């Protein structure tokens, strides 16, 4: 019996998180923000989309479980430059490509001792996401996606000849599999409003060559993002305010098949954001995210706040470069 791909992906997204041993998260909460930034919006056939953004993730909060510790001598900061482009081939089928450049910093200060500062920078891992719109009827749109995360980022950076920890490396050194779902509803009472639900699952692979004789596997992760947005006119500006809640569950890292202590947990974040339409094709976005809840396995630094800002640009059939040139020639 042939495999029904959309049904299979639904099972992966909705059932798998409940079947995996739920005892974890990962220290990569300070790493490249992959899953939460995947997936460009649905667009017309033959449309190109581009998104370029800067993401700042600051971790200053030290926790054991849900308890916050009164210790402020540690800090973890991740600066990420994120690029995503996508092309819509048909009314239903599209492809997105995600790439990043990341700088990660870890700072530890102790009274009477020299500060311990580490940083790495380089290109991160890339993602190819194949998307298929299975429902596009009336006010409801549902798109499913799947694809690989490619180990394009370095995972062997050293400091004074010593290999930097896996959580500070720009790349993971492993192939991952990603499943993604995007459900959008426009209420009939207000068609400028959107209700959205994004679900993603990243099943991580294993870097078999970490420290030459070791294997390292980052914990898989599951995320749900529920959001509401609207479009309002402020003077001559079209403004899109939005509010999202993000739940993230990440599973424990493994070294040589054994669970790594102090990795694992779950979070709930709130993310207010605003988009400003500079033109019919160009939008400026700004968002600020803070945690509402965190339950950490062991003792870990956990996110304190995150800022994301950038631009989104689209070229569709009526505004593509070829048509613009024809319009100029007609003049």
Image: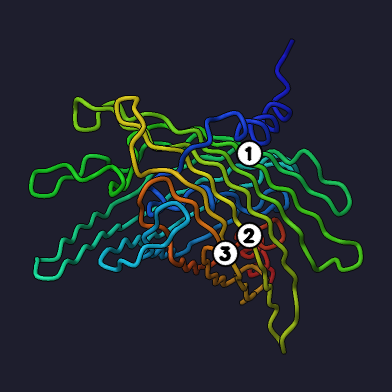
Q: Residues within 10 Å of mark 1 (few under 14, many from 20)?
A: many
Q: Quadrant of residue 17?
A: top right
**Residue with the most extreme bottom position:** 235
Q: Residues within 10 Å of mark 2 (few under 14, many from 20)?
A: some
Q: Earlier in the sequence, mark 1 or mark 3?
A: 1
SS for callout 1: strand
Horizontally, residue 46 falls left or right of residue 309, namely right
Tag 3 residue: 312
Return the x and y of residue 154 as percentages of the image width and height: 27, 42
**Mark 3 or 2, closer to the camera:** 2
Return the x and y of residue 328 as percentages of the image width and height: 64, 70
Say which residue appears at 28% left-offset and 49% top-offset.
168
Q: Earlier in the sequence, mark 1 or mark 2?
A: 1
Indicate which disc residue 45 carries. none
Cα gap from disc 1 to disc 2, whole angstroms? 21 Å
SS for callout 3: strand
Tag 2 residue: 245
Viewer-closest of 141 and 24: 24
Tag 1 residue: 145
Task: Please tell me whether residue 215 is drawn above or below residue 171 in the rendered image.
Answer: above
Cα gap from disc 3 to disc 2, whole angstroms? 22 Å
């Amino acid at each position: 019996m042939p495999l029904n791909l959309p049904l299979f992906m639904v099972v992966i997204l909705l059932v798998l998180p409940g079947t995996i041993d739920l005892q974890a998260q990962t220290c990569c909460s300070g790493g490249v923000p992959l899953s939460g930034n995947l997936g460009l919006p649905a667009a017309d056939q033959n449309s190109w989309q581009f998104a370029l953004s800067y993401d700042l993730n600051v971790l200053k909060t030290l926790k054991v479980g849900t308890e916050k510790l009164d210790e402020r001598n540690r800090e973890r900061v991740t600066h990420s430059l994120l690029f995503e482009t996508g092309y819509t081939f048909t009314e239903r089928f599209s492809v997105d490509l995600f790439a990043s450049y990341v700088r990660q910093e870890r700072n530890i200060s102790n009274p009477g001792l020299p500060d311990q500062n580490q940083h790495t920078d380089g290109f991160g891992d890339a993602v190819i996401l194949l998307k298929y719109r299975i429902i596009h009827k009336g006010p409801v749109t549902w798109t499913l996606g799947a694809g690989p995360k490619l180990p394009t980022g370095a995972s062997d950076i050293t400091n004074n000849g010593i290999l930097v920890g896996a959580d500070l490396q720009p790349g993971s050194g492993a192939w991952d599999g990603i499943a993604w779902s995007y459900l959008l509803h426009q209420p009939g009472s207000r068609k400028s409003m959107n209700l959205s639900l994004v679900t993603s699952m990243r099943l991580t692979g294993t870097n078999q060559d970490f420290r030459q004789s070791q294997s390292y596997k980052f914990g898989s992760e599951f995320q749900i993002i529920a959001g509401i947005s609207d479009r309002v006119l402020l003077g001559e500006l079209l403004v899109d305010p939005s509010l999202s809640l993000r739940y993230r569950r990440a599973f424990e890292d493994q070294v040589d098949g054994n669970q790594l202590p102090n990795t694992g947990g779950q979070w709930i974040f709130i993310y207010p954001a605003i988009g400003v339409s500079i033109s019919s094709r160009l939008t400026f976005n700004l968002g600020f995210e803070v945690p509402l809840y965190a339950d950490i396995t062991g003792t870990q630094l956990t996110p304190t706040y995150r800022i994301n800002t950038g631009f989104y640009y689209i070229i569709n059939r009526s505004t593509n470069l070829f048509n613009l040139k024809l319009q100029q020639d007609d003049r």
